[in-house]
Image (cartoon, rainbow, N blue to C red):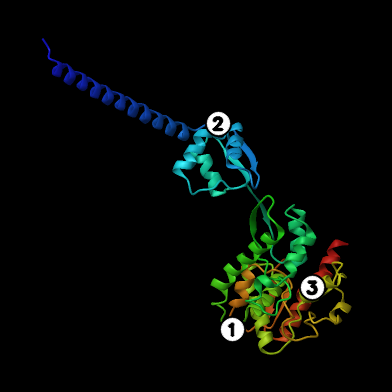
């Protein structure tokens, strides 16, 4: 016969055992739920490209509902638990997104946390004036022309490098950019100036062997940009202008007059002999030295040529009419080149076309 104490000990044993089994069961269920949740969060889903916009100020719950409804993520509650416990410091950023599926919930959320929004490319070519650059950006749908011109007309972004600048003429670096939808005109202009500063401050200014300040370097480079088509010739063209500056000889650069005509609103695509007498500080036929400022936005090749011109004695060059030039050290040699490549060339060409 089992004593009362024995029965109590047996009851206690089975009670403790039952609790232990229950605890193990709960732990097993909990571990199973965690494993299921992790598999669900990492499971690739979908097979399409999904595009959607997250507006500024949208609550987190609404963002997750929108992503779930679009099939980008799974259960929004599970996604919320993941963010709350695994990424509590991270924020889902507004913008236009493209989700290329299959993609897991974790990968989709990570993309939005990083703010990898859709961007649209635009190429700003070398040699454009400030207004032509504004027109290019506006025509591609990145903003309003007047707003671009207004942002580019303030020299504040470059005042520390060029205290004499009256605008950002010359400092809007030509390149291919990618901007998200809805970015403002001032932000686009700031990106172009940042690009200029990165290219020039770190690489070109320290390399300038002629001691040019920023304004002189960019002004000279802008003339080289408009005069030289072939990249290989730009150090030679830059050398010609450096040599003429050193000897106080006028630059005689047609693009500076064309720039003055553009600023006056009278440029019609033809440079006439009477234009060489234009009363403008940008007329380098009548005013020696560099013009008051840049005449366009030069690219890196022209900036580098202005900073590091070729070591040649040339003072003149004339076009071969194929994008390249013939260079000369003396006026007599230059006159012979003009006779060959301008007078005779065009006479023969007109005769051949009859």
SS type, badge 3: helix
Q: Name the residue under label 1.
A: 211
Q: Which residue lies furthest to the left in this view?
A: 1
* Distance in Å between CA atoms under marks 3 and 2: 56 Å
Task: Please tell me which residue is depicted at 44% across the width and 32% down the height of the picture.
Answer: 37
Asked if disc 3 and disc 1 are in contact, CB closer than 8 Å, the reply is: no
Task: Please tell me which residue is depicted at 64% across the width and 61% down the height of the picture.
Answer: 175
Q: Mark 3 points at which residue?
A: 259
Residue 3 % position (x, y): 12, 14
In this rendering, position of residue 309 left or right of residue 139: left
SS type, badge 2: loop
| N-terminal label among 2 and 1 | 2
Residue 286 to residue 85: above or below: below
Quadrant position of the C terminus in the picture: bottom right
* Distance in Å between CA atoms under marks 2 and 1: 60 Å
Residue 164 to residue 92: above or below: below
């Amino acid at each position: 016969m089992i004593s009362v104490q024995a029965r109590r000990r047996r009851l206690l044993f089975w009670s403790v055992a039952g609790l232990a089994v229950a605890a193990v069961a709960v732990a097993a269920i909990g571990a199973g739920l965690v494993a299921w949740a992790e598999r669900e969060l990492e499971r690739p889903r979908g097979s399409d490209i999904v595009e959607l916009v997250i507006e500024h100020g949208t609550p987190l719950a609404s963002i997750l509902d929108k992503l779930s409804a679009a099939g980008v993520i799974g259960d929004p509650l599970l996604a919320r638990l993941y963010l709350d416990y695994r990424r509590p410091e991270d924020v889902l950023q507004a913008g236009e997104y493209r989700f290329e599926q299959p993609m897991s919930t974790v990968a989709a959320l990570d993309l939005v946390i990083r703010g990898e929004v859709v961007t649209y490319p635009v190429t700003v070519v070398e040699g454009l004036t400030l207004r032509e650059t504004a027109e290019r950006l506006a025509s591609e749908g990145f903003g309003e022309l007047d707003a671009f011109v207004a942002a580019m007309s303030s020299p504040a972004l470059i005042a520390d490098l060029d205290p004499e600048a009256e605008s950002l003429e010359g400092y809007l670096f030509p390149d291919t950019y990618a901007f998200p939808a809805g970015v403002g005109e001032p932000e686009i202009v700031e990106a172009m100036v940042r690009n200029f500063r990165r290219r020039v401050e770190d690489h070109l200014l320290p390399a300038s062997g002629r001691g040019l300040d920023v304004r002189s370097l960019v002004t000279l480079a802008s003339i080289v940009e408009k005069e030289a088509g072939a990249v290989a010739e730009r150090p030679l063209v830059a050398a010609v202008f450096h040599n003429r500056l050193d000897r106080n000889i006028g630059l005689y650069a047609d693009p500076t007059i064309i720039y003055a005509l553009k600023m006056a609103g009278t440029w019609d695509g033809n440079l006439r002999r009477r234009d060489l007498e234009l009363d403008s500080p940008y007329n380098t036929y009548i005013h020696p030295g560099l013009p008051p400022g840049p005449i366009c936005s030069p690219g890196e090749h022209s900036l580098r040529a202005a900073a590091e011109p070729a070591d040649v004695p040339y003072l003149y060059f004339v076009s071969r009419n194929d994008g390249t030039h013939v260079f000369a050290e003396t006026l007599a040699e230059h006159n012979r080149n003009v006779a060959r490549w301008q007078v005779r060339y065009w006479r023969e060409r007109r005769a051949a076309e009859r």
